[in-house]
Image (spheres, rainbow, N blue to C red):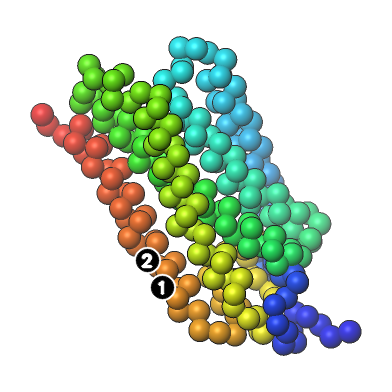
Amino acid sequence: MPDSNTTDFTNPSTFLLLGIPGLEAAHVWISIPFFAMYAIAVLGNFTILFIVKSEPSLHGPMYYFLCMLAVTDLVLSTSILPKTLSIFWFNSGEIDFNACLTQLYFIYCFSWMESGIFVAMAFDRYVAICNPLRYSTILTNPVVAKIGLAVVLRGGMLILPYPLLARRWPYCKTNIIPHSYCEHIAVVKLACADIRISSYYSLSMGFFFFGLDVFLTSCPISRYSGPS
């Protein structure tokens, strides 16, 4: 049976994640802080959700955005760390092709959602500080819901080309990914086709949209932190 890791093939059924190349002997030790961070993330975010749900006085825009951030962080960390830990603990690096693309989508989608939520939280603080008397009339529950929906749709739609383009490329090099998760460029670089459209789209997302989020997040902060 030919070794699928080294021979040419088309559209692999699985990829092989290496974890952290060169540090395989230390994977068990490296897993300890990763596991601790994941446990803290799960416990902390569920605690936030429980407290906000249980305390009626916290049912306001700021805490709704905080809950959105908690859910996003839970999904994001769960998309990465369980598979990473299975590589570190059990050397279980194989991942199905479709599962790899699904993981890729969830990681980048919820990363962009998290970025959008930071923008929403900055806007919330801007309104609360600069227009405190109109805060409750500007950021009503329907407005918060619309902002949340816009964040979800933006993240979902902007990242959708990532797995769609990755799925259409023919793969004929290797199925080894030198990462502990399915990183977008690392996956498409395995294709035996012109992947410039994927590379350009990824770069434009990073420079334009991430830069826009940083600008929109920092503008309200500088506006209400500067001299009046």
Q: Residues within 10 Å of mark 1 (few under 14, many from 20)?
A: few
Residue 177 image offset from top left, x and y in percent: 65, 71
Q: Which mark is residue 159?
A: none
Q: Amino acid at mark 1?
A: Tyr
Q: Which mark is residue 204?
A: 2
Q: Quadrant of residue 118?
A: top left
Q: Secondary structure at mark 2?
A: helix
Q: Is residue 217 above or below residue 3?
A: above
Q: Is residue 10 above or below residue 79?
A: below
Q: Is residue 201 above or below residue 62?
A: below
Residue sitting at x 21%, y 39%:
222
Residue 102 image offset from top left, x and y in percent: 64, 58
Left or right of residue 159: residue 169:
right
Is residue 16 in sight in this rendering? no
Q: Amino acid at mark 2?
A: Ser
Residue marked by disc 1: 200
Quadrant that contains the N terminus: bottom right
Residue sitting at x 10%, y 29%:
228
Residue 35 image offset from top left, x and y in percent: 68, 44
Residue sitting at x 59%, y 59%:
104
Furthest toward the right, the residue is 1
Is residue 139 in sight in this rendering? yes
Q: Is residue 93 above or below residue 9?
A: above
Q: CA distance from mark 2 to mark 1?
A: 6 Å
Residue 68 image offset from top left, x and y in percent: 49, 34
Q: Secondary structure at mark 1?
A: helix
Q: Are marks 2 and 1 in contact (CB under 8 Å)?
A: yes
Q: Quadrant of residue 174?
A: bottom right
Residue sitting at x 59%, y 85%:
192
